[in-house]
């Protein structure tokens, strides 16, 4: 068995910009609780240009947009208005229903800007699919940073040894940004659950097989060691899968297809809360 399977992203056009969609794909529907993983950029926008993801709804998931460069203004139906900036966590818990938008901030749009980001969705456990929506901001300075053996690990969500992220998520998960110095290695134990690695830059390999930049390396069960010759930067996605398979339709995630059909009808009929200050929306 090879040490991992490499999954290339599929280009998706989202109105004015495109992303590389790593999951879901026919070859891989999820990694632990992760049911969606998009990579955006690095991309340069000229003065007057920007990203405009109009208000749209979600159910049954939590979202995290992780930025390396640039900024996005998040607005939601709870009244949250916040600029997503590099290194900070903005964790949106959709529960039974939330509406949000993401747009380039006015100052960045006016001057021109560069953006590099990852967006992930994680399914909510069945016990939390119908809870009230919420939004949690964690500043970069408040995230655990573990430094050991040439590895610097920023813990975005979940636990790692004695360290725990302040992000509230009621299911086993590990989401981390990792920098490895030249010659360093990192164990990826099977106790983490289902595991995948996304190489951002540099060189890295597992079991003698090199990772492909901007592809998702999906690990089989069993022990694995990640190593680098010249240093690298990467993301780790891991965790336990949900007890029941998750269905995805448009922006909706749920264990029950009937709940998704009801959410589609609710959006079409104007039954979701709207985002204060927004007049546009994305039709189903």
Image (cartoon, rainbow, N blue to C red):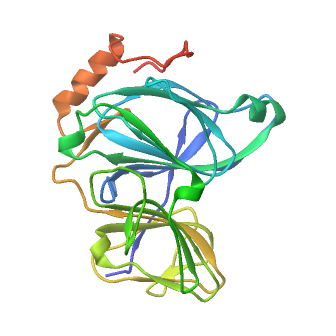
Residue 195, quarter of the rendered image: bottom left
Where residue 190 appears, x then y in whole percent?
Answer: 29, 77
State the quadrant of the C terminus. top left
Residue 221 falls left or right of residue 232: left
Residue 154 visible to the viewer: yes
**On screen, residue 249 above or below 19:** above
Where residue 73 appears, x then y in whole percent?
Answer: 61, 33
**On screen, residue 185 above or below 159:** below
Q: How many marks?
A: 0
Determine the residue positioned at 23% across, 47% down. 125
Camera-side residue of 194 and 156: 156
State the quadrant of the N terminus. bottom left
Where residue 283 appears, x then y in whole percent?
Answer: 44, 18
Where residue 257 appears, x then y in whole percent?
Answer: 19, 33
Residue 44 visible to the viewer: no
Camera-side residue of 259 and 206: 259
Determine the residue positioned at 64% across, 80% down. 231
**On screen, residue 87 above or below 136:** below
Determine the residue positioned at 34% across, 79% down. 189
Determine the residue positioned at 27% across, 17% down. 265
Residue 276 falls left or right of residue 34: right
């Amino acid at each position: 068995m090879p040490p991992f399977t490499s999954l290339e992203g599929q280009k998706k056009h989202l109105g004015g910009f495109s992303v590389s969609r790593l999951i879901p794909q026919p070859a891989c529907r999820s990694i632990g609780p992760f049911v969606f993983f998009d990579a955006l950029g690095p991309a340069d926008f000229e003065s007057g240009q920007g990203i405009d993801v109009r208000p749209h709804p979600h159910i049954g998931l939590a979202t995290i947009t992780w930025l390396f460069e640039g900024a996005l203004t998040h607005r939601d139906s709870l009244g949250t208005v916040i600029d997503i900036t590099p290194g900070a966590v903005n964790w949106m818990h959709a529960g039974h229903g939330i509406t949000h938008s993401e747009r380039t901030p006015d100052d960045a749009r006016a001057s021109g800007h560069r953006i590099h980001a990852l967006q992930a969705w994680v399914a909510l456990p069945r016990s939390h699919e119908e809870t009230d929506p919420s939004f949690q901001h964690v500043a970069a300075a408040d995230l655990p940073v573990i430094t050991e053996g040439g590895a610097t690990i920023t813990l975005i969500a979940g636990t790692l040894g004695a360290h725990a992220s302040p992000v509230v998520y009621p299911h086993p998960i590990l989401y981390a940004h990792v920098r490895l110095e030249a010659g360093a290695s990192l164990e990826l134990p099977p106790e983490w659950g289902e595991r995948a690695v996304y190489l951002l830059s540099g060189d890295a390999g597992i079991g003698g097989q090199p990772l492909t930049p901007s592809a998702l390396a999906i690990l089989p069960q069993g022990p694995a060691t990640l190593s680098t010759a010249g240093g690298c930067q990467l993301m780790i996605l891991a965790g336990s899968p949900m007890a029941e398979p998750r269905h995805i339709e448009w922006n909706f995630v749920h264990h029950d297809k009937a709940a998704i059909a009801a959410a589609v009808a609710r959006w079409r009929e104007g039954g979701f809360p709207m985002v204060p200050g927004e007049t546009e929306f994305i039709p189903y």
